[in-house]
Image (cartoon, rainbow, N blue to C red):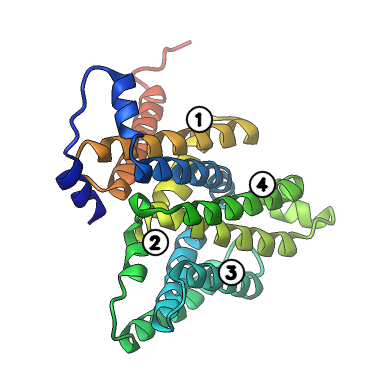
Amino acid sequence: MLTAGLTAVVSPHPGWNVVADLRDLLSYPFMRHAFVAGTIVAVVAGVVGYVVVLRQSAFAAHALSEIGFAGASGAVAYGLNPVAGLLAMSLVGAGAIGVLGKRLRGRDAAIGIVLAFSVGLGSYFLTIYKGNASGAFALLFGEILGISVGDIWIIAVAGAVVLLALAAVYRPLLFASLDEDVAEARGVPVRALSVIFLLVLAVAVTAAVQVVGVLLIFGLLVTPGAIAERVTRTPAAGMALCVGLSLAFIWAGLAVTYYSSFPVGFLVTALAFAAYLVVRIGGALRSSPMLVSSP
């Protein structure tokens, strides 16, 4: 809705002068807010997303966003802030998944059980609410062009908490993610680390949902990590590439949205999907017997 309004009111057209185009694009406060919020979210999602892929927790990331939506709809039903409800329910869901699922492997059942209950709860909240639930529904697809200064501060604080928490547990978390059994045998608190990471993931999901929405969360939290895992050899290089890709997808998505009628969430996920296809096709071609020279 905001994108359509932007096109109708501003009607911008790109020219050949990139500097002038950027100056025009950033002359509007809502675009500056979107770029600042998008940059923060890209950095946080890039770092967290790489660990998500490394721990094979993509389903958990998607589930936490939908679990959080139940909190957002509940907050709307009782006249509270939907983002606060999203964060609270995501944290509760992360704790429940961490307690119910003991190991990385086989945790899907615990996630599915918590997810099914949360979706039903969200449906109930939307049923009892008789007013306009646009605040909750906006979280389904994100509304980055409606980000306020207050929202930016919330995202910045949430991002700082996520990065500091990950920095504190980085080495043991990385060890447990690469080989859970060996890490546990060496005395690493695998289960506690798993719960901590799920709570960190819940905060990161809450921040990212405001950009790409509940239904498109994979575009930022999974796809860049999946690409980085394929083309890098070390975790540091993987995280750096993951952050770079997330920034590129969000910045390009916002710029194209400014000059078109396409929503930001669609552009971010479309760019991420296209990049993933290029990497997969490039990898397939490199390993093709027709292109590999014989010794």
| Residue 105 shown left or right of residue 226 in the figure | right
Instruction: Look at label 4 and name its amino acid.
Output: Leu
Q: CA distance from mark 2 to mark 1?
A: 28 Å
Q: Earlier in the sequence, mark 1 or mark 4?
A: 4
Q: x and y percent of residue 161 in the render?
A: 65, 54
Helix, strand or loop at mark 3: helix
Vertical side of 95 occupied by 52: above or below: above
| Pointer 1 local density, CA inside 10 Å: few below 14, some 14–19, many at least 20 | some
Residue 27 position by quadrant: top left
Helix, strand or loop at mark 4: helix
Helix, strand or loop at mark 2: helix
Instruction: Look at label 2 and name its amino acid.
Output: Val
Q: Which residue is mark 4?
A: 178
Vertical side of 182 occupied by 67: above or below: below
Q: Which residue is mark 3?
A: 91
Q: Earlier in the sequence, mark 3 or mark 2?
A: 3
Q: Which residue is mark 1?
A: 231
Q: Earlier in the sequence, mark 1 or mark 3?
A: 3
Vertical side of 188 occupied by 244: above or below: above
Instruction: Tell me the mark number nearer the camera, choosing from 2 and 1.
Output: 2
| Residue 127 shown left or right of residue 203 in the figure | left
Q: Earlier in the sequence, mark 4 or mark 2?
A: 4
Q: Which residue is mark 2?
A: 214
| Pointer 3 local density, CA inside 10 Å: few below 14, some 14–19, many at least 20 | many
Instruction: Look at label 1 and name its amino acid.
Output: Val
Q: CA distance from mark 4 to mark 3?
A: 25 Å
Residue at the image position 52 percent from the left and 47 percent from the top? 45
